[in-house]
Image: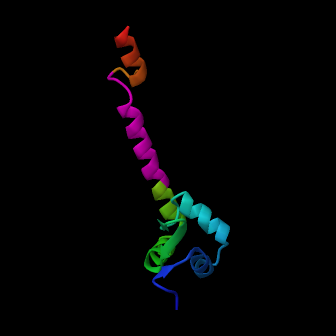
Amino acid sequence: MAAEVMTTEQAAAYLQIGVVALKRKAQAGRVPAAKVGRAWRFRKAELDEWLHYGGEVYERQVDEGLAIVMAERMAATKDRKGKPLDQFLAERRR
């Protein structure tokens, strides 16, 4: 039986993927994980849910969420006419 909280090695064995691949997915936010100091930790329940929804679906949701956040950030850095905010402020200082 897998532990409730697993190390990278334990989670990789549980998911039947390589440790390096799992670390890359964790660093990219593509698999549910938490960093504890320098080590990654994985909750079995979250990994089970990730698997249930087919890992790829979770990864697409992460990508879509990131795209929305980036679009909002880009919009927030422009004035009403679509000009980059730093350019707008520089012109106003002249």
88 vs 69, nearest the viewer: 88
81 vs 27, nearest the viewer: 27
Q: Is residue 64 above or below residue 73?
A: below
The quadrant holding residue 71 is top left
Residue 75 among those drawn in magenta? yes
Q: Is residue 43 above or below residue 93?
A: below
| Residue positioned 45% across, 57% down in the render | 61
| Residue positioned 59% across, 77% down in the render | 15
21 vs 52, nearest the viewer: 21
Q: Is residue 28 above or below residue 78?
A: below
The quadrant holding residue 69 is top left
| Residue positioned 50% across, 66% down in the render | 37
Q: Position of residue 45 (x, y in %)?
A: 43, 79
Q: Position of residue 72 (x, y in %)?
A: 38, 39
Q: Residue furthest top?
A: 94
56 vs 88, nearest the viewer: 88
Left or right: 35 in relation to 93: right
Magenta residue span: 63-80
Magenta stretch, overall SS: helix
Q: Residue furthest front?
A: 37
Q: Position of residue 39 (x, y in %)?
A: 54, 69
Residue 86 among those drawn in magenta? no
| Residue positioned 50% across, 57% down in the render | 60
